[in-house]
Image: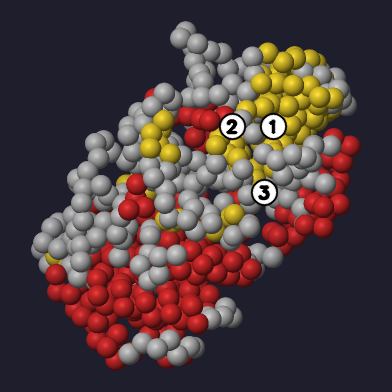
Amino acid sequence: MGYPDRILERVEPTCDGRQPYPPIADYGIIGDSRSSALISRHGSIDWWCLPRFDGDPVFNRILDTRRGGYFSIRPTSPFQTTRHYRPGTNILETTFTTPTGTLLLVDFMPALLEPDKERLALPFREIVRRVTCPVGTVPIEIVVRPRPNFAATIPTTHQPLPNHYSFHWDAHVLHLATTHPLTPSNGSLTIRTTLGQGEHLDLAISYSDIAPAYLPVLSTLDEIERLTTEFWKHWSHTCTYHGPYQEAVLRSALTLKLLTYAPSGAIIAAPTTSLPETIGGVRNWDYRYCWLRDAAFTVRALLQLGYRSEAHAFAEWLLHATRLSHPEMNILYNVYGETRIPERTIDYLDGYQGSRPVRIGNAAHKQFQLDIYGEVVGALALYRKSGGYFDRDARNLLRGIAEVIRRRWREPDDGIWEVRSGRSQHIHSKVMAWSGLDLIIEIAEEFDPIGIPTRAARATANAIRDWVTDVGYNTQLGAFTRTPETTDLDAALLVIPLVHFLPPDDPRLISTINAIQQHLAVDELVYRYRGEDGLPGQEGAFLISSFWLVEALARIGRIDEAYHLFERLLERRNDLGLLSEEVDPTTGTLLGNFPQGFSHTGLINAALTLEEETT
């Protein structure tokens, strides 16, 4: 399944000096739950933000092959690549097969328990790259070319110790330790050498913005690699799902773990910015933040897989972050719960395959989305039911959310998809507002005396339901629509059976699912919507919508069809089991920021729903 292996000849520049852009599916991810790096099938680190997910990318060639920084290790002769993660880990192994021999590249970020980090004096952020030649001889080239400040700065290079190098810009330093000497030139380090059978080459690169700093130490790499392997395997063994899709579910869980910022518990949408929804288009967004709309789906996935500590950490981060604007909520926050994320463009960068502009920050932080109140309450309800504790501030938050929904549910909003065409009366937003009130009432009656007037809250919930069923269902079309008095469909309405707004045998629900399949789906792939959204161009089919279709079909009893579509969706993953935000149904190309947490959450929840509906 997945993205097929194929022969990749040594990459040569085009006639204008540019390097070709690898497909988005050509990338794998490594990380340490604080930062992450994308590595191509060519063995090139083309994306690494420091000191955290939304920081400055010092390697950024994925957004501009001419100016961007990278850290490349590859044979200089033609090669074929295969790659995989070590089972149950986020350690990436890439095998290069050449006419004269084989090269094995192992990439990882150290992931250790805190006592081991202190004992081994690990650097603040570190990537380890280990190269061996198990067969024959292989000529190789290594290029280390950081370009910080979004490729605007060429750092200065120094060699403080033998086989130790450093890159300096402002108050920042990258430290590189290597077993082989490199040659500095214009803010880069390079080497061309040949590895013979049994020979190896190690490199470790780390970041610091304070002095003194721990430097990478090559003599401890064997132990660090062993401890990192043990860390990931122990984490994977916690997974309680043992169904037929265990490999895909576990890989998605491991990906979500890489998108988790461990110091706060926040889970970001994706580690990248401006990977396009259409090649060459303008639908390029910065997803290196935490969206509240993802909350309930993510907490459910983590809890049902047995990852209670991660689910509770995320829910507790939600409680912390939302206190800053209580009871009103922003739709996205950074990993520490800050809400000011202004959007700007980096106009000198080409963008991925010429997809401009490159955006930093996200203007959606100014939008009003009614649905997030329901999604946050959904996450907190799961948290409480799984043993979480609501202190006075948490109860005040829930009481405040109930009041916001009661006061604002009739207002138009920007909707779950953050369109830039203005506010409307989105039916999905009303459904989620109903869900939020329904769950708050349940919490108040079964768990905590939140202090809301439950009779009044139930009356508002009933009013919302009546409004949706009265004006949200188009009898001529036979479906709930995106907004009242239109024929526009919205794939987000596939969540109706998932939040129990209508029973699974309700004919209006069944006909809505049928209409979405007929008008928004191309086989297993589902577009979010059709029609005007305030932006030029088109987008690909949205993967979370496609997994919602699987869940909706399973909930209404069409199990065989749901299984068929789910297995087709698994084939959309790349060879490492990773998914982006969207897929071009015509070409199969992965589109959008990568890897996308919402897509992997959708995969997990679809697998769990299939299991629930067949047991």
Is residue 367 shown above or below 157?
below
Label 1, label 2: how far apart the Cα atoms are: 9 Å
Q: Taking the image as drawn, is residue 245 in sight?
A: no
**What amino acid is at disc 3?**
Asp
**What amino acid is at disc 2?**
Val
Q: Which mark is residue 287?
A: none
Q: Taking the image as drawn, is residue 181 in sight?
A: yes
Residue at horizontal 64 percent and vertical 19 percent from the top? 187
Q: How is the image coloured?
A: secondary structure
Count residues near mark 2 (Cα–Cα under 10 Å), then give few for <14, some for 14-19, many for 20+: many
Q: Earlier in the sequence, mark 1 or mark 3?
A: 3
Q: Is mark 2 on a helix, strand or loop?
A: strand
Q: Quadrant of residue 61?
A: top right
Residue at horizontal 59 percent and vertical 66 percent from the top? 313
The percent position of residue 256, horizontal first and vertical second, equals 57, 55
| Near-viewer residue (417 or 265) | 265
The percent position of residue 479, horizontal first and vertical second, equals 20, 64
State the residue position of label 3: 32
| Near-viewer residue (183 or 160) | 160
Q: Which of marks 1 and 2 is nearer the N terminus?
A: 2
Q: What element carries label 1?
A: strand
Q: Is mark 3 on a helix, strand or loop?
A: loop
State the residue position of label 1: 174
Is residue 426 shown above or below 110?
below
Q: Label 2 near label 1: C-beta < 8 Å?
A: yes
Q: Which label sits in the foreground, 1 or 3? A: 1
Label 2, label 3: how far apart the Cα atoms are: 17 Å
Q: Which label sits in the foreground, 2 or 3? A: 2
Say which quadrant the N terminus sits in. top right
State the residue position of label 2: 58
